[in-house]
Image (cartoon, rainbow, N blue to C red):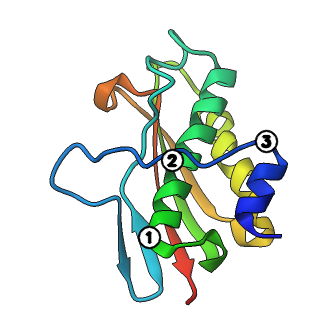
Amino acid sequence: MTPEERLAQIGLELPLLRPTWGDYVGCVRTGNLLFTAGQGVDQYHGKLGRDLTTEEGYLAAQQSMLNLLSVVKHELGELSKVKQFVKVLGMVNCTEDFIEQPKVMNGASELIVKVFGEKGKHGRSAVGMAQLPNNTAIEIEMIIEIEE
């Protein structure tokens, strides 16, 4: 089963590519590594711990990862060319006393493990931010190893 088929099986689909907001690209390939630019979300805005719950943050992280997977598919043509998720960095727009960044980021991590299995296991950082562009709830970037 392809990653795209697994996404459909769990009732999710890749969104359209989001436009970039400056002079940069959605990802850069160097050798067998793909480095993505950060992807926020259009559906969830505000600070975790004040405007949004941890559960809403989880859904925001899941949506951000779907946005990232759209970038990857656009670059590679098919998600089955992913060999390994190497590193995921999650930046959570949150209040100073919010401490559930890892629970929020589980929305992204659990999604890629469901879709990619062992290839989805990755190193991860989940950090709180004072503010993110357009007051998005989350921004995620990642490094993946690819095979042709």
Query: What amino acid is found at the position of numbered circle 1 in the picture?
Result: Glu
Q: Between 39 and 54, which is closer to the camera in this rendering?
A: 39
Nearer-N-terminus badge (2/3): 3
Label 3 residue SS: loop
Front-lying residue, 66 or 144: 66
For the image shown, how many numbered marks are present on the structure? 3
Q: CA distance from mark 2 to mark 3?
A: 15 Å
Residue 102 picture location, percent across and down: 64, 39
Please say if 73 is above or below 137.
Answer: below
Q: Quadrant of residue 29?
A: bottom left
Q: Residue placed at 15% from the left, 54% from the top?
A: 23
Left or right: where 81 falls relative to 75: right
Asked if residue 90 shows in the view, the reply is yes
The quadrant of the picture occupied by the N terminus is bottom right
Find residue 124 and report its horizontal and vertical position in percent.
58, 56
The type of residue carrying mark 2 is: Asn
Disc 2 and disc 3 in contact, CB within 8 angstroms: no
Mark 3 lies on residue: 11
How dense is the environment of label 3, judged by Cα within 10 Å: few (below 14), some, or many (20 and up)? few
Kindly state the secondary structure of the residue where label 1 is placed.
helix
For residue 105, what is the image quadrant?
Answer: top right
Of circles 2 and 3, the one toward us is 3
Badge 2 density bin: few <14, some 14–19, many ≥20, Cα 10 Å: many
The residue identified by callout 1 is 75
Q: Amino acid at mark 3?
A: Gly
Identify the residue position indicated by label 2 in the image: 67
